[in-house]
Amino acid sequence: MPFARPTACLALLAVLAAGCAVDSGKAETTASGPSGYPLTLDNCGAKTTVEAAPRQAVSLNQGVTEILLSLGLADRLAGTATWTDPLPESLTGADAGVPRLAENAPSFERVLAAEPDFVAASFASTLGTGGVAERDRFEQLGVPTYLSPSDCVGKDNGGTGDGSRTTPLTMDAIYGEIRDLARIFGVPERGEDLVASLRGRLEAAADSATGADVSVMYWFANAEAPYLAGCCGAPGVITNELGLRNVFDDTTDEWPQINWETVAERDPDVLVIGDLTRRSQTAETAAKKIGFLEGHPVTREMTAVKNQRYVLLSGQAMNPTIRTVEGVELVAEALRRFGLAG
């Protein structure tokens, strides 16, 4: 759709638009011309139509940004936001010329100032109430939006937490997102190449180590009330690919907050720890997390802490992203190093 300049945008804010239900990320193409446009996708319960390949896209979360950079689309990005980790070395050069609108969530006005013709986000909370803006507001201004299917398919984002999953996440959701974005930007062959590369890496990592009877816990952030992975999000992909057992696989909450006494009782063999660079929670870096674990009277007696069986992952590897594959690789490598690989 054509982009409306900010001055024109203000006049359109009263226009009503359809709301966003969260149910499906399946792509559905409408009638299009020889170029493949206009292209319409059924995306998380909303119809997203692009009239032409985006040239001024804004990516609101690091996960979707890394997909776009991996597809060679840095020159199509007018801005990025919401960063938790350094980029992989393979993407730093591509990102160098892309403006960062904010390290965390930008304002709606800051995004509009970049004059986007397409806006993408990894999380429903980013394009929802309390986020940058609801999808309706962008759509009313002629700016199509896209939400990662991994955060809506099989997931309930209601309530005040990070949502819960009725269906375990698989890499197919991420592969679907890659293909969607590649089609939207008119580079479908690049999408297929990226998916093939990720599939190959995932299969190689899963074949290199299995952790039968090895228990694991995933700690993302916060020391006082830690966010630990439930059964079925991105850490569940790592768990299932390597045949591990998540000690909190009895909860479908994405990232429930659980007290340390309960953690100590379940006593995992291995601790997978988020090594984050953001500063929005306590104990963000791996160093601070390990310092806490080894100094706390309850956690320092845990098997994994006594044996220093720590696996450090980026936040992106613990979210539904292309770097979840990296998470599988690093945990597999650690299992071999700890002598726990089957």
Image: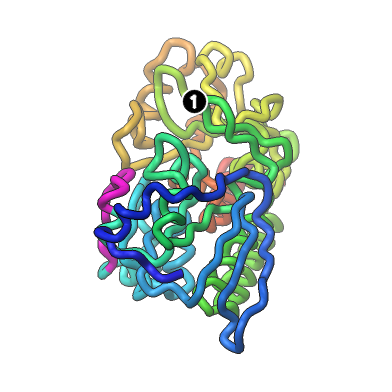
Residue 208 seen in render: no
Q: Position of residue 9 (x, y in %)?
A: 32, 57
Looking at the image, residue 100 sits to the left or right of residue 161; the answer is: left
**Residue 98 place in picture, x, y as percent:** 28, 66
Towards the viewer: 170 or 295: 170
Residue numbers of the magenta segment: 98-110
Q: In this rendering, is residue 323 above or below 126?
A: below
Q: Identify the residue shown where x is 43% and y is 10%.
A: 297
User: Dot 1: within a 10 Å radius of its alpha carbon, few (fewer than 14), some, or many (20 or more) residues?
Assistant: some
Front-lying residue, 197 or 211: 197
- Residue located at (62% from left, 75% from top): 192
Asked if residue 13 can be seen in this view, the reply is yes
Query: Is residue 121 or residue 68 the one in the foreground?
Result: 121
Q: Which residue ends up furthest to the bottom in the rendered image?
A: 34
Residue 86 in the image, given as x and y percentages of width and height = 34, 53
Considering only vertical position in the picture, is 330 above or below 263? below
Residue 202 belongs to magenta span: no
Three-letter amino acid code of the residue under disc 1:
Val
- At x 62%, y 80%, the residue is 32
* Residue 109 located within the stretch drawn in magenta: yes
Q: Residue at position x 52%, y 37% from top?
A: 272
Quickly name the residue at label 1. 305
Residue 240 location, quadrant: top right
